[in-house]
Amino acid sequence: MTDTAIATAPTAPAGQTAEILRVQDLKVHFPVMKGVIIQKQVAKVHAVDGVSFSLRRGETLGLVGESGCGKSTTGLAVLRMLEPTAGSIVFEGTDITRLSRDQMRAMRRRMQMVYQDPYGSLNPRMRVRDIIGEPLQVHGLDTDRAAYRERIAALLAMVGLLPDMAERYPHEFSGGQRQRIGIARALALEPGLIVCDEPVSALDVSIQAQVVNVFMDLQERLGLSYIFVAHDLAVVRHISDRIAVMYLGKIVEVASRDDLYREPLHPYTQALLAAIPVADAAVEARRERLVVTGEVPSALSPPGGCRFHTRCPHATERCRTEEPPLVGNAAGRTVACHLHPA
């Protein structure tokens, strides 16, 4: 690997299932403090409460759910940008929850993030060349200035921008172009995993598809693995290989993209998909809908049993008292619901 180019990842053998990431029983709780001078903890927010999933090399895992369900917090915790309360995060064979700050700094060369806001995530006082090159500077990889400039130009070209744009400032670009700059910055250290935190939600619909195509093209060329956090189910369906559905800090269903959209098993997943409008008015009028009533419970005091039981039209007494585990069933699907036991 040279300093001036990004190598194309070798093609993985057909059926390769090597894991790059395994998250087990991840919890992120935020304390709620009371008092001004003498503070004491009076409660805690269960933002993420026992999340487990895996990610294969070259795979995209979509992470979906309502606002406040813990999607972004999960992504930040996976990179240890938020410290987990409990659980393990094994990345490329190493449990990064056990690493020191210095050890984690070195590991972050392999783990990067693309943020939601293409306006707020770029320093308006820095030129594009310095924004993209900052990770190289932080990790001491900018010693050869000629190679450094060539690397910046190569990264810009990879995301569909011209090399001379390196001399401009962020305010001179559109939202879609700014997000491409953010993607180039994430690629600077040649990561294996990128967490994409709603990277197209702030963009116009006409631009979203272009940016999603950039992600997919880069994945094919470089063998990247993505955790793609989003609330737009159409975008998730386009880019994801598998989809994990979150509700109130828990994963309630994991399935391949096609299986999930063809036959959602968990009532919450069914409600999410039923909320997607259909362009054909006749089909829209005929299709069945699962109506979910009520508000999402507070993460300060989540309900016992299945957390969705307060809104689920199929809830039974067992749902109110016994939390369903996330397990695979006879059909090869993974779901946390008493209606679909293993």
Image (spheres, rainbow, N blue to C red):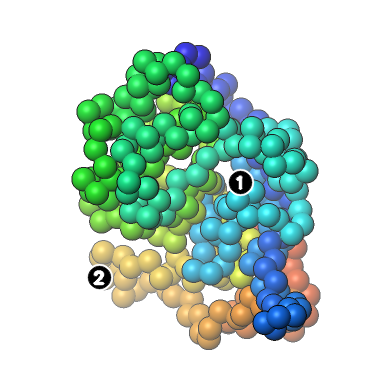
Q: At 42% across and 25% down in the image, what residue appears?
A: 221
Q: Is residue 135 above or below residue 23?
A: above
Q: Residues within 10 Å of mark 2 (few under 14, many from 20)?
A: few
Q: Is residue 226 left or right of residue 288?
A: right
Report the amino acid beneath label 2.
Ala
Question: Looking at the figure, which quarter contains the C terminus?
Answer: bottom right
Q: At 50% across and 44% down in the image, what residue appears?
A: 113
In the depicted view, which residue is nearer to us: 300 or 250? 300
Q: CA distance from mark 1 to mark 2?
A: 43 Å
Across and down, in percent, residue 74 comes to: 60, 56
Report the amino acid beneath label 1.
Leu
Disc number at residue 79? 1
Residue 81 visible from this viewpoint: yes
Q: Nearer the viewer, mark 1 or mark 2?
A: 1
Q: Is residue 205 left or right of residue 302?
A: left
Q: Is residue 78 above or below residue 214?
A: below
Residue 209 visible from this viewpoint: no
Q: At 37% across and 55% down in the image, what residue appears?
A: 120
